[in-house]
Image: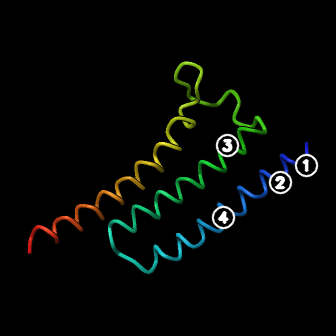
Amino acid sequence: MDSGVIIYISSRLALGALTAFFAIMLWSRTRDAAWMLMVIGMLTAYVEIIYSIVEMFGIPEGMIVTIGSIPLASILLPNLSAIFILSAFLIMVFRKYRKKYKS
């Protein structure tokens, strides 16, 4: 394995773990729907990081559900985190505009 690949994997795992740790800490402190969706989006992004690294090593070969030639998890995980984060931003935007036009 190339040293660049080791640095790539280590940095993704370390930063992802740090993000997931702080997301879990925030989750225990907040009950706001927008922040909860943001935390779930970050945790889903970390799952995607772990899956992509495991996939790099070729471990899930043969036990993957595919759509055509693309593994279903490769389609779902990045999009799922984006959906959660998008939902959080939409909630924040709707709250902002609802307060603005209510007054």
Q: Quadrant of residue 53?
A: top right
> What residue is pinned by disc 4?
17
Q: Position of residue 77 (x, y in %)?
A: 53, 44
> Who's the residue at 47% across and 42% down the image?
79
> Who's the residue at 79% across and 57% down the image?
10
> What residue is pinned by disc 2?
7
Q: Which numbered disc, 3 or 2, marks the residue that appears first in the sequence?
A: 2
> What residue is pinned by disc 1?
3
Please tell me whether mark 3 sits on a helix, a strand or a loop. Answer: helix
Q: Which class describes the residues within 10 Å of circle 3: few (<14), some (14-19), or many (20+)? A: some
Give how far apart the Cα atoms at labels 3 and 2 are: 15 Å
Give how far apart the Cα atoms at labels 1 and 4 are: 21 Å
Looking at the image, is 49 positioned above or below residue 56? below
Give how far apart the Cα atoms at labels 2 and 1 are: 6 Å
Q: Which numbered disc, 4 or 3, marks the residue that appears first in the sequence?
A: 4
Q: Position of residue 3 (x, y in %)?
A: 91, 49
Mark 2: amino acid: Ile
